[in-house]
Image (spheres, helix red, strand yellow):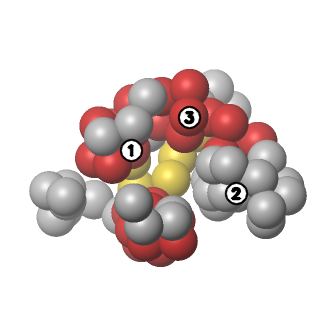
């Protein structure tokens, strides 16, 4: 995963690109609250008109996904 080194947070599209998933999957993860759902919950902030996801939270979320 190539990380944006100079940023602490990314938007939904960039988060999706970083983890090679669709923006819809990232949005579903943001909106879910059940820890047993797929995708699992992903922490994000809502800045009035868009979501902001900390890169550290994105990495932790990606690492929590099941291995293939």
Q: Position of residue 14 (x, y in %)?
A: 33, 38
Whether residue 54 can be seen here: no
Of 47 and 4, nearer the camera is 4
SS state under label 3: helix
Disc 2 crowd, CA 10 A, few/some/many (<14, 14-19, 20+): some
Q: Secondary structure at mark 1?
A: helix
Q: Mark 3 or mark 2, which is nearer the start of the sequence?
A: 3
Q: CA distance from mark 2 to mark 1?
A: 14 Å
Mark 1 and mark 3 lie on one chain; the one further toward the N terminus is 1
Q: Is residue 32 above or below residue 28?
A: below
Residue wearing tag 1 = 15
Residue 68 in percent (x, y) is at 39, 60
Q: Which mark's residue is nearer the viewer, 1 or 3? A: 3
- Residue drawn at the location 68% of the way across and 36% of the way down: 28
Image point 85% across, 58% down: which residue?
Answer: 34
Question: What residue is rendered at 14% in x and 56% in y?
Answer: 2
Quarter of the figure with residue 47: top right
Query: Which marked residue is nearer to the observer: mark 2 or mark 1?
Result: 2
Which residue lies under the disc numbered 2? 41
- In three-dimensional space, the C-alpha distance between marks 1 and 3, rounded to whole angstroms, equals 10 Å
Seen in the picture, residue 40 relative to 64 is either above or below; the reply is: above
């Amino acid at each position: 995963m190539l990380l944006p080194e100079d940023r602490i947070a990314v938007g939904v599209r960039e988060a999706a690109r970083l983890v090679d998933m669709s923006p819809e999957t990232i949005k579903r993860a943001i909106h879910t609250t059940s820890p047993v759902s797929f995708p699992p919950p992903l922490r994000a902030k809502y800045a009035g008109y868009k979501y902001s996801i900390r890169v550290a939270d994105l990495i932790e979320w990606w690492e929590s996904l099941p291995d293939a």
